[in-house]
Image: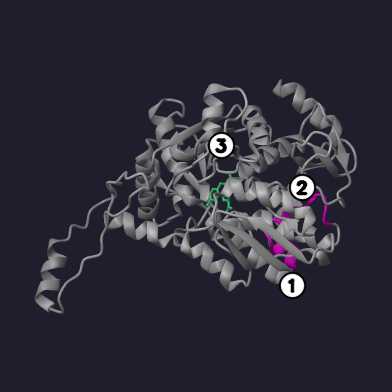
Amino acid sequence: MVVAEALIRWILAAMPPHLACFNPSCGQRYPLSEIVYSCGACGSLLEVANSFADVDPETLRATWRMRRSSLEKVDVSGVWRYREMLPFASDPDCIVTLPEGNTPLFDAPGAASYAGLESLQFKHQGYNPTASFKDNGMTAGVTQAKILGMRRVACVSTGNTSASMAAYAAAAGMQAVIFLPAGNIAYGKLAQALEYGALTIQVEANFDQILALVRELAAEIGIYLLNSVNPFRIEGQKSIAIEMLEQRGWSVPDWIVLPGGNLGNISALGKALRELREARLIEDMPRVAVVQAEGSAPFFRHFVEGGNLRPVSAPETLATAIRIGDPVSWHKAAFEVGSADGIVESVSEQQIADAKAVIGRCGIGCEPASAATLAGIRKLVRAGTIRESADVAGILTGHLLKDPDYVYHYHSGQLETPSGYHVQPQFGNPPVTVPNDRTRIAELLDRAAVGPFP
Ligand code: F0G
């Protein structure tokens, strides 16, 4: 099934770049200049289709390496440096960049030993200009908005998409309209949207309900929608995999692991890997693992049970970025997981919280949703799915400072879910308050153990 689908996709792609319906039995095509997010014929999402069969991989590698020493804004960007893989923005003057990408690939021995692995790398997308992986996609989405002459862009968000879109819209001189689930986004992200000048609308509904509403409204009120239903955003997010593989000298890991919410990121990762293989930049596909939070895990359930995805009507998790019950890109994600012999896992609130603290103790840090990556890796190693000696690269999607309340509550033993589960911090590090007394402070320092990594 996956092989047949892949073949049809390959045939459709062998034409000038265009938008293609993701449903292979539909095959509807649209010009890149059309403002359309889902197929008019069958309702499926769209993707930018292009052929990479004729590229010379050695020339591409050398070109991308050379651009690292260039001062041109399109070369400095860790997205547009790979512009041959993003076949839609031919005029460099249209490109809206802050610049993004260029994120580090860390070796994390402490996290490796926590997970039961010999070694582990983290590609940290929290090192982007607005501190999440969304910037890789947003530079592409807002660039397309500029090409189309749009003045107003909009998104529904659990926080990071809105922070990112607000920044790129401000840089491009466009109005940003963002819709947020009231009371359910981390303060760091809300603060960003306000500061970047977005019209910020908090709706008393959850992410899925608001997205359904705004998708209907988009055409009526003349806004360009920049959720991950937008195929150009997915094009930008492909650069996460491209840059990671380049940083690894094009050596393909055994596994790439990432958190899943609305499932745009796994869709982009899978598309990038397929296209890199078509371009002969890599020979083998890594396996992929998508990790969801137990209380918001419809894709995990679909993976285990098969059939159509059944949405979770009241998704819950303290990792608010992935508090999504009806992931809009699940068809794409299911195809990409199948193409990469991948799996889907789910992890508990306790597992996410402790894994997050371990990533912090490596000197790396991340936001809660990102820590699902390490929690998932640990679970999969314990189950024997990932070998102890496997070469594993995890994606950390957002920065530690996005959600400072979560951090404080964890370390001070106050982290609790709305349904009353109290997280027991295995690596808690509460602040210590002392009187202004030299002796007491000296005693405290004497007593404090300087221990090795847990
Ligand atoms: N990690 C972080 C930090 C996120 O912000 C998100 C999604 C995900 C993981 C999941 O990625 O949706 O592509 O599967 N955040 C979106 C937002 C939904 O609105 O910021 P996904």
Q: CA distance from mark 2 to mark 3?
A: 21 Å
Q: Is residue 430 left or right of residue 327?
A: left
- Disc 2 to disc 3: CB gap under 8 Å: no
Q: 271 or 150: nearer the eye?
A: 150
Q: Nearer the viewer, mark 2 or mark 3?
A: 2
Q: CA distance from mark 3 to mark 1?
A: 40 Å
- State the residue position of label 3: 253
Q: Residue at x 55, y 41 (%)?
A: 260
- State the residue position of label 1: 173
Where is residue 144, by image quadrant? bottom right
Three-letter amino acid code at the position of disc 1 = Gly
Q: Is residue 241 left or right of residue 312?
A: right
Please provide percent x and percent y for residue 207: 57, 49
Disc nearer the start of the sequence (2/3): 2
Judging from the image, what secondary structure is the residue with disc 3 in?
loop
Q: Residue at x 55, y 51 (%)?
A: 205
Please provide percent x and percent y for residue 375: 41, 40
In the figure, 197 relative to 231: above or below?
below
What's the colour scheme? one colour
Judging from the image, what secondary structure is the residue with disc 2 in?
helix
Judging from the image, what secondary structure is the residue with disc 1 in?
loop
- State the residue position of label 2: 85
Magenta region, residue range: 69-89
Q: Quadrant of the N terminus?
A: top right
Please provide percent x and percent y for residue 346: 46, 35
Q: Residue at x 85, y 38 (%)?
A: 54
